[in-house]
Image (spheres, rainbow, N blue to C red):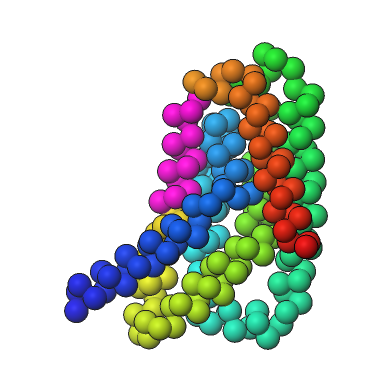
Amino acid sequence: MLEVKVDIFITGLLLGFSLIIAIGSQNAFVLRQGLKGQHVLLVCAICALSDAALIALGVAGFGVLVKQAPWIELFARYAGALFLIIYGARSFWAAVNNKAGTLAPASETFFSIGKVVLTCLAFTWLNPHVYLDTVILLGSISTQYGAQKWLFGLGAMSASLLFFFALGFGARLLTPLFVNPMSWRVLDFVIAGVMWFIAASLIL
């Protein structure tokens, strides 16, 4: 019996990793904050707890409600696309206009906690892909485990927790690379491209 429970937990853990590991807008933001060393713990905690809340909603059956009220997904899609377009433009502008010598991690502009929290929440809760992965997909799969579905959900939540904290604090290992101003420029261009690509996929 214990082995079965462990298997269910591991299944949720592995599936959670497979869904979250792809490069996306939220991951790019966490990576950037990790490289800058600004509010990293808070950002990782917000992302992990938000994922946990969404997975819990899915396991509890909220996915059925989303299917019955399509306007929820439609609103999230266009609101998320608009946010990504604006943030992508901001990253592109930063890459084009920042001058050499101002992009070292220690000299990066320090944003207030409020601004970082709002941005982080927007990346999570205005991203319809997050709802599809956590609320609908994980929520639907959890139903096959009956009374053990929360164990499956706990595994998926653990994957988010491990991934975001590893990404945020592991980014420091790349700090020597990002002492070079060109590395920051390239990162901003990549982030802008990721944001715009995801925004286009949402609209189209």
Q: Residue furthest top?
A: 101
Q: Report if residue 163 lies within the magenta region.
A: yes
Q: Report if residue 113 lies within the magenta region.
A: no
Q: Nearer the viewer, residue 46 or 137?
A: 137
* Position of residue 194 measured from the top left corner of the image (x, y, whole percent): 67, 45
Tell me if residue 117 comes above or below residue 100 in the rendering. Answer: below
Question: Of helix, strand and loop, which mostly describes the magenta segment?
Answer: helix
**In this rendering, position of residue 45 left or right of residue 187:** left
**In this rendering, position of residue 94 left or right of residue 66:** right
Is residue 80 in view from this perspective? no
Q: Which residues are magenta?
A: 162-175
* Position of residue 181 measured from the top left corner of the image (x, y, whole percent): 64, 19
* Position of residue 31 measured from the top left corner of the image (x, y, whole percent): 55, 39
Q: Quadrant of residue 183?
A: top right
Quadrant of the drawing holding the N terminus: bottom left
Is residue 3 in view from this perspective? yes
**In this rendering, position of residue 81 left or right of residue 22:** right
* Position of residue 15 measured from the top left corner of the image (x, y, whole percent): 42, 64
